[in-house]
Image (spheres, grey):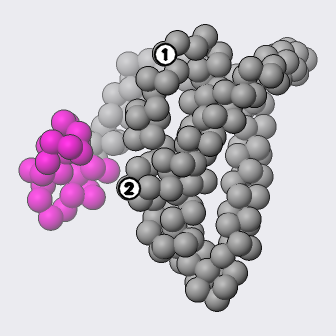
Amino acid sequence: METIYSLLSGFATALQPINLLYCFFGTFFGTFIGVLPGLGPAATIALLLPTTYHLNPVSSMIMLAGICYGCMYGSSTTAILLNIPGEPASVMTCLDGYQMARKGRAGLALSVSAIGSFVAGTTTLIALVFTAPALAKFALKFGPTEYFALMLMSLSIGTYLARISMIKGLMMACFGKDFC
């Protein structure tokens, strides 16, 4: 029952006119910048983060979420129309969407992408609302043993995937992908 009450309280906050306006601006500018190839949601949020400094925290988070969702949809636009994925998640959109655009059905491909994005995002958020408390309780039970096991597993997978150059693979696992 507490989850439903929190969800209704969140809707009451999110559906205020000023927050809806910030969500619209975030989605609009996220889509506008997301159309540029190579700029994913993280880069778009980094570019537009200064626009949220003067807002209250709730409006800022709503605007940043709108920027992220707008960018995800904007990158599918370049994937469908130009066969250039704007981010890694749009690679599969290139396969079917660009072929539909070449056959003169670009509008249908863009609308399917928008509707699919909306349905998937809504379904995921609903699932997250109901599973987040259980996941948080589970994550808080992690201790040193579990953290060690996770680190060991991630280093093992990293070294397995870097079979060609083990030194580069270990450096990448220890220092990050931008180091190598």
Location of the N terminus (image quadrant): top right
Q: Where is residue 81 in the image (x, y as percent from the top left)?
A: 55, 72
Q: Does any portion of residue 92 appear in the rendered image?
A: no
Label 2 close to label 1 by CB (< 8 Å): no
Q: Which of marks 2 and 1 is in front?
A: 1
Q: Give the range drawn in magenta.
A: 157-180
User: Which label is found at residue 38?
Assistant: 2
Q: Is residue 99 left or right of residue 113?
A: left
Residue at mark 1: 53
Q: Compared to 18, does 65 lie above or below?
A: below
Q: Is residue 171 left or right of residue 8?
A: left
Q: Does any portion of residue 79 appear in the rendered image?
A: yes
Q: Is residue 5 left or right of residue 155?
A: right
Where is residue 43, by image quadrant?
Answer: top left
Q: Position of residue 65 (x, y in %)?
A: 61, 33
Q: Which of the pair 11/24 is nearer the observer?
A: 24
Q: Residue at x 48, y 73 (%)?
A: 82
Q: Where is residue 59 in the image (x, y as percent from the top left)?
A: 65, 19
Q: Residue at x 63, y 34 (%)?
A: 25
Q: Which of the pair 172/75 is nearer the observer?
A: 75
Q: Is residue 45 left or right of residue 109?
A: left
Q: Compared to 3, does 109 lie above or below?
A: below
| Residue 47 colored in magenta in the image | no
Q: Compared to 40, does 15 lie above or below?
A: above
Q: Which of the pair 64/180 is nearer the observer?
A: 64
Q: Which residue is drawn at 71% across and 58% down?
A: 114
Q: Which amino acid does label 2 sit on?
A: Gly
